[in-house]
Each structure stands twice: as structure tokens, then as C-alpha cells.
């Protein structure tokens, strides 16, 4: 990446990476789409009406609320608050995939996904993917399913986490998407304590780090920060609410907004400070060090 010509070549490839898929990888999904464009709630700031536009034809984005736009690289630099080299590093897997590893076309965000089979996790490719994310098999099998689905006449398989309306969050090594209808996931156990977690692998990571905490609490997995408004009415019903959002600008803004509205919320992101999210912490620290998260529950009860 240090070579000037290599950087230019990487930039050329990175600009061709689909912005809609890049946003999906980060947990942001369109509120409406057409053949030429997709509209999102801005990943760069808090808003309730979608004003973030992606031209599917030109593969460019524009945030009307900020008067700012650009390429896939510009988007990552804005979301991650990073420089060009760090943005290319983040996109490096997609750059390699784009340039060196053509494969069977995965369905796009706009293509209809039809779930055909839901079964226990058993495919080696999916089990290896869980292992690469440091998720114990028993945790993956407890909360997720192996999903076979069809799109445009082709069949695919992923790990799936079901949401409140019967849709699925879908993940494998190469693919991140969801089936309709899309909303948050909820595990209710009759607890007076609620965990609000940003994404599917954040939830699985927390279960791996502190299974007792997860099993003794009601849990909401947002599946997208866009669904925060949908769960606000539930928050006052709990004595304690623990918040686990990403340590990025979007997650920080969402956490700040919730903390300003409710006094029963504790922001637990300091437990994985230095990392983007819980899964990054889990992958980079040993189990003994990760267990420090188990103290969050006791700390919250004293607040």
C-alpha cells in the first residue's frame, strides 16, 4: 500500500466497490430504492427522514443534510474519521475480491430473497466463519440458524438471526444482507434489565464474553441504528438498560441521543474502548481479559 502506483491502483478499484453493499456491511440499509438510486438515513449523523442518496448508476453518494458526497473511499473516510490509507485498508478485502476473486454473484440489496430452508448450523463453511469471528459453536447454534435462500434462480446459504417480524439477518464470509421484513431482533426473558446491542455479531460476541449477563437480560439487537426510534417506547419499562453500540461516530451519536432522553441507560462502550465493537474486542483479546465485561451488570445496578 505504500507504493504510489499501488495506492492509485487500489483507489481505482475501491471506487468501483458498490456503495450500497458497503453500507450494508456497516449495518445501514435503504429505506427506499429504485433502479437508479437508494435512500438511506444518513450514516454520518442522526436524522429521522432519509436524506442520504446513493446513485446506483454512478456509484456515488450525497448527503443532502450535510451538502457532502463522493465515492466509496470518501464515504469510509467520513464514517470512520480516517485517512486515505486507513480507508483503503478497511476496503482491502473488497478490493482483493473485486480484482482477484470473481465468484458467483451474490444477491444485491434490491433483489428479492426467498427463504427456502431453516435448519441447525452444520455446514463447515459457516462453522469456520463463526470460528474466524471467535464465536463458540454452542453460542452460534443457540441463537442462529443455517439459512438456505433463493435469489434470481440461484441458491445460497448463510448464518441467520431472526428478527421480530420474521425476517432474517444474513451473514457469511462474503455477504451481509437481510430478508424482508427488516427490523430489530428481540429476546424476552421477563427481566427488568435490557441490553441494547447494535449488530448480530456484537450480540453473539457479548454472549461469548458474558453468557450469564445475556441469559439473565432481555436483549434487543437493533440490526441497524435506523431502528432506534422503534424501540424507544420499550426503554422506560426497564429498571436498567445497558447500551452496546459501536465506537464509531454513528454509534456515539446514537448513544448520546438515547442518554439524553432516558436516565435508566448506562453506556457500556467503554468496556471495549480502543475497539470498533464487541466482536473486534473478542477477536483481539484472550477470554480471560474479555471476562472483565461481566462486571458491567453489577456496575450498572449501582448507578
Image (cartoon, rainbow, N blue to C red):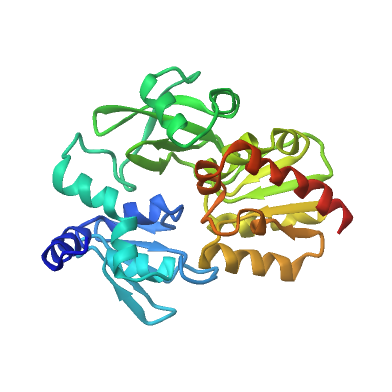
Judging depth in this view, the residue of 235 and 82 nearest the camera is 82
Up-down relation of residue 107 to residue 122 (above or below):
below
Residue 260 falls in which quadrant of the image?
A: bottom right
The structure residue drawn at horizontal position 21% and vertical position 63%, both measured from the top left corner, is: 15
The structure residue drawn at horizontal position 44% and vertical position 58%, both measured from the top left corner, is: 31
Q: Is residue 146 left or right of residue 229?
A: left
The structure residue drawn at horizontal position 59% and vertical position 66%, both measured from the top left corner, is: 252
Q: Is residue 116 left or right of residue 34?
A: right
Up-down relation of residue 6 to residue 101 (above or below):
below
Q: Quadrant of the C terminus?
A: bottom right
Q: Position of residue 169 (x, y in %)?
A: 48, 39
Residue 291 falls in which quadrant of the image?
A: top right
Q: Position of residue 137 (x, y in %)?
A: 53, 24
Q: Is residue 116 visible?
A: yes
For the image shown, how many numbered marks are present on the structure? 0
Residue extending farthest left: 5
Up-down relation of residue 2 to residue 124 (above or below):
below
Judging depth in this view, the residue of 140 and 147 nearest the camera is 140
Q: Quadrant of the N terminus?
A: bottom left
Q: Position of residue 261 (x, y in %)?
A: 74, 68
Residue extending farthest right: 302
Q: Is residue 239 visible?
A: no
Judging depth in this view, the residue of 203 and 109 nearest the camera is 203
Q: Position of residue 106 (x, y in %)?
A: 27, 38
The structure residue drawn at horizontal position 63% and vertical position 60%, both measured from the top left corner, is: 229
Amino acid at each position: 500500500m505504500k507504493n504510489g502506483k499501488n495506492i492509485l491502483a487500489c483507489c481505482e478499484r475501491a471506487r468501483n466497490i458498490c456503495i450500497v453493499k458497503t453500507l450494508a456491511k456497516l449495518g445501514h440499509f435503504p429505506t427506499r430504492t429504485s433502479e437508479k438510486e437508494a435512500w438511506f438515513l444518513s450514516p454520518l449523523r442522526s436524522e429521522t427522514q432519509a436524506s442520504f442518496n446513493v446513485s446506483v448508476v454512478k456509484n456515488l453518494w450525497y448527503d443532502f443534510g450535510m451538502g457532502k458526497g463522493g465515492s466509496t473511499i470518501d464515504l469510509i473516510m467520513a464514517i470512520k474519521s480516517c485517512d486515505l490509507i486507513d480507508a483503503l485498508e478497511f476496503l482491502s478485502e473488497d478490493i482483493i475480491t473485486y480484482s482477484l476473486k470473481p465468484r458467483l454473484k451474490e444477491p444485491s440489496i434490491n433483489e428479492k430473497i426467498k427463504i427456502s430452508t431453516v435448519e441447525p448450523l452444520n455446514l463447515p463453511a459457516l462453522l469456520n466463519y463463526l470460528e474466524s469471528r471467535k464465536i463458540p459453536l454452542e453460542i452460534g447454534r443457540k441463537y442462529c440458524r443455517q439459512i438456505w435462500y433463493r435469489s434470481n434462480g440461484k441458491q445460497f446459504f448463510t448464518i441467520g438471526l431472526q428478527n421480530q417480524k420474521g425476517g432474517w439477518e444474513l451473514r457469511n464470509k462474503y455477504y451481509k444482507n437481510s430478508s424482508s421484513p427488516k427490523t430489530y431482533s428481540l429476546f424476552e426473558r421477563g427481566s427488568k434489565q435490557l441490553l441494547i446491542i447494535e449488530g448480530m455479531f456484537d450480540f453473539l460476541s457479548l454472549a461469548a464474553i458474558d453468557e450469564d449477563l445475556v441469559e439473565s437480560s432481555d436483549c434487543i439487537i437493533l440490526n441497524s441504528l435506523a431502528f432506534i426510534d422503534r424501540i424507544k417506547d420499550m426503554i422506560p419499562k426497564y429498571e436498567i438498560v445497558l447500551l452496546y453500540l459501536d465506537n464509531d461516530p454513528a454509534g456515539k451519536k446514537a448513544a448520546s441521543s438515547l442518554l439524553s432522553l432516558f436516565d435508566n441507560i448506562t453506556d457500556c462502550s467503554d468496556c471495549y474502548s480502543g475497539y470498533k465493537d464487541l466482536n473486534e474486542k473478542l477477536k483481539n483479546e484472550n477470554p480471560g481479559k474479555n471476562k472483565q465485561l461481566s462486571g458491567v451488570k453489577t456496575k450498572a445496578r449501582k448507578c
